[in-house]
Amino acid sequence: MSTSDQVSAPPRFVSRAVPGLCLNMIVRDEAHVVCEALASVAGYIDYWVIVDTGSTDDTIAVIETFFRERGIAGEIHQRPWVDFGVNRSEALKLCNGKCVYAWVIDADDLLVGEFSLSSLTKDAYLLRYGSDFSYWRQQIFRVAADWKYEGVLHEYPRSAKADLSEGRIEGAYHVESRRLGSRSREPDKYRRDAQTLEAALQTDPDNTRYVFYLAQSYRDAGDQSHALAAYTRRTLMGGWDEEVFYSLLQCARCLEALSAPWEQALAAYLRCWQFRPSRAEPLYWLAKHYREQAEYELGALFARRAAVIVLPEQDRLFIATDVYTWRVKDELSICEYFVGRVAESFELYTQLLACADLPEAERERVLLNRSFATPHMQAVASVYPEAIVARLTARRAVASGATDAITLTITTCRRFNLFTQSVNSFLNCCLDLERIGRWICVDDGSNDADRAQMQALYPFFEFIDKDRAQKGHARSMNLILQQVKTPYWLHLEDDWLLFAPERYIGQMLAVLDDDPAIGQVLFNRNYAERLSCQNINGGAVKFTARERLRYRLHEHHEQGTNAYDAHINQLIAGQRSNAWWPHYSLRPSLLRMSAIATVGAYRSESTNFELDFANRYTAAGYRSAFLDAINALHIGRLTWQRGDATLTNAADLNDEPQLE
């Protein structure tokens, strides 16, 4: 092959290509990985210039085939390897006359997400690299600005133009630098990099970038002592403040790794934060240290200060994004719990669970940690909310609620104590109660004294009293169906205690709006009754299109089917499943009345009227969804306690047959 081969193109494929945007790369032995990088950016470019610096595999053929199949013209050149600065500069110069902008990437880079490049006007553009750990790099260059790269390693671009303009490419994307290229396969890569940089510093001892990446190379090679020395050297050289900050931070990290006296590491972290107080990372590491040492007040002190520092959007070097989005709150919530600020801890955990940036692998741990605060939250939620009751009572006195979209109902049966706990907890924890226009309680057999107390405690309720001829849960539910005239129906039972304050109605309405097949949204995921039900597996995680609110869609399989067997077989030790139960449950939820009306009435003659209704609901094509947490506890007799004669439920109290 000649030193310069041009690949002509057949008719182009449809893409989002930007006229005049050329892909620019240097490659060597990248056949195993380069197609993934090319595929992620091919839709944006209309030309490519790639330089091969001595491949011994099929890299050149792989690249040519890739672009030929997609109809994108370009050229590949072969040049001997010198160093990164020389070879990248050479590759950029080959773009002259071929394009307006050159987009430089590595063979193992991967564009994740999408952005728009339709209005490029500046001399250079930075792209976001990484997600949890992010940084910005100049990668798109106006060719006419006469760019070249400097540096034997960790090269950087420089333009001959005096009045250089620069911008950022924003959007829901990042570039992954995957460290999968041929150079990353070398087992002693970082040690060799350190040697290269040490040699370069012999002739250019004041090169701050060389010193910084020398420290980085020693650290990545596991040589903390030499890394500490190089980072310290870099902090004394001045220059770019972000690089100095990161060097100060790594000095502290190295001291910890070397098991230096804690006073030295502490001083290093504080010196780092003092240098750049807009960055939270040093405070995060301090909070983590004190939490691990069970010094929780100190941990809370540093975490609380870190928590008010916002993500430094304008910084560009090595930002630990996850520290700002969730890690600091995680540390603070643990410390707050152990110093006795339990409600604050619970609220922080609730915020974490609502955070889209919380990794899936961390979610169950966070949910479990939150559960430790539940006894405290139960006690708080059970208190009679006098001010809320007064507000709702006054509201009922001036408005009929006929035009409101939501009716709340609750059934009760001779369980006054459970009823008051349930209502109190809902009033205390549902933070958007004003969206409810009508409150109805169907009372099945309470004595006169209990009824009088219920009416006195909750005067905003309409109480429907049943006689003995109307007894039974199914009949209560049918009475409710006759009463509810609103588009949405929020139904409670008298033995569920809500403990997590949240804007439940807004969230549930968002889920119902997300999918017309969803007719019900339950407060607890996977039909859970207790905190121990966290180990119930199943349900597809979804996010609403508009609010990006997380929820679960119930996963149902008929018992005896291959799908059910496959679901059960994938459970790991300790997990349970509710996949056998259909969509729909009487457990606390918000329902779409048009779906319920389609299914029809509850059949009191059925031995399990709930299951009968659920089967008909499922057969009609409706689905049930869950808020993806456990927010309420079943405080009556639990499903698995039916055989315990010492425990009674509403059916026992009403002398009705049990659901089977």
Image (tube, rainbow, N blue to C red):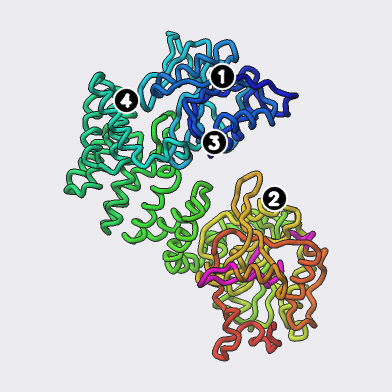
Distance (Cα) linking label 3 and label 1: 19 Å
| Between discs 3 and 1, the one toward the N terminus | 1
Q: Which mark is residue 2?
A: 1
Q: Is residue 94 magenta?
A: no
Q: Are marks 2 and 4 in contact (CB under 8 Å)?
A: no
Taking the spot 47% from the left edge, 27% from the top edge, the residue there is 54
Q: Nearer the viewer, residue 301 or 4?
A: 4
- Predominant SS along the magenta part: loop
Residue 205, quarter of picture: top left
Screen quadrant of the C terminus: bottom right
* Mark 1 element type: loop
The image shows residue 524, relative to residue 285, as above or below, that is below
Type of amino acid at the residue the image marks with label 3: Ala
Which circle's residue, 2 or 4, is located before the other in the chain?
4
The label shown at residue 209 is 4
Give the mark nearer the N terminus: 4 vs 1.
Answer: 1
The residue beneath circle 3 is: 31
Residue 351, placed above or below residue 649: above
Mark seen at residue 514:
2
Looking at the image, which residue is at 45% across and 42% down?
132
Residue most extreme to the bottom = 645
Q: Which residues are magenta?
A: 570-595
Marks 2 and 4 sit apart, C-alpha to C-alpha, by 50 Å
